[in-house]
Image: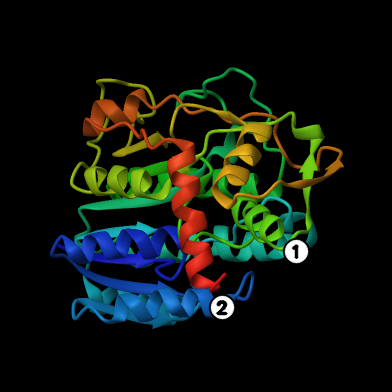
Amino acid sequence: MHILMTGSAGFIGYHLARRLLADGHAVTGIDGMTPYYDVALKRARHARLAAHPEFSAHEFMLEDHARLDAACRAARPDIVVHLAAQAGVRYSLDNPSAYVSANVVGTHNLLNAVKALPVRHVILASTSSVYGAGTDCPFTEDQPCNHPLSLYAATKKACEDIGHSYAHLHDLPMTACRFFTVYGPWGRPDMALFRFTRNILGGLPIDVYNGGDMARDFTYIDDIVEALVRLLPRPPGNGDAAPARGASPVAPYRVVNVGNGQPVGLRDFIRAIERATGRAALCNNLPMQPGDVPTTWADCAMLEHLTGFRPATTLQSGVDAFVEWYRDWYDI
């Protein structure tokens, strides 16, 4: 197949593109190379993908609808994987306009560009953050998501709703994947694993919010990729009924949680990094940050029903793999 992927220089995009290329598919990537974090890391990811003859890339923002339209028409993809977004809960407090522009406007522009193409399936990246103030754990796809706690979460929920309307109006099969705290080699420098590893290896303190009384459903990158690869050839039908959870009754659209299904406390997460690095963490305890949620926990029964796959990578093995990559990348 020919896959058009936005955010191909990002963390998830890089790993997914590598897998798709290895499986014999062609990938056209689009990435804006925004400076939210070290652009050198993004360019290094793209450079490794460019070594494959079936990978081609464009560098522009999705807000540039003219270039986006031209790239989509030229690619004529079988599958579209939309991973590009302005990420990060805390940064949305500092630069909210970036989230509306990149996430809402960018998603609209992409769907508008591909609606008339013979696309078999659109995969739309969403996030566990859309569950917001929800306390009914584990989170299921049919839970109401009406109380976002950050602008990041609000824009990603808006993207889901925009996607549903395009699926309904243009018969565009779409799956919105709600990712739960993705981690692993080549991960984002703004994420806790990257920041904690950097500071622990450097003998610097780490910021621990809410006294460590938080839990996240950490999901290893290889499990995310495997789930996506299995979902790609399984587009939803109009009004899929079995099981109804997460599926629209009026459009070829569904929501699927992609998580490990086993929340880990922040203190246990830190201990896993300490074991991987062989060093003790110096903790700087801080209050809960605005926009944060105390717990994320995915019910992945829908994913397993659709694909026969359930993520199962243990936290320690995933953290070990990240720390090994980090030491090699930074020659520590």
Q: Residues within 10 Å of mark 1 (few under 14, many from 20)?
A: few
Q: Is residue 193 above or below residue 75?
A: above
Identified by mark 2, the residue type is Val
Residue 36, given in percent of the width and then of the height, sits at: 64, 70
The residue under the point 56% across, 78% down is: 39
Residue 39: which numbered mark, if any? 2
SS for callout 2 = helix
The residue under the point 52% across, 56% down is: 323
Q: Is residue 15 above or below residue 250?
A: below
The alpha-carbon separation of the residues under discs 2 and 1 comes to 18 Å
The residue under the point 79% across, 61% down is: 94
Q: Is residue 26 above or below residue 170?
A: below
Identified by mark 1, the residue type is Asn
Total count of labels: 2
Residue 308, given in percent of the width and then of the height, sits at: 22, 30
Contact (Cβ within 8 Å) of mark 2 with mark 1? no
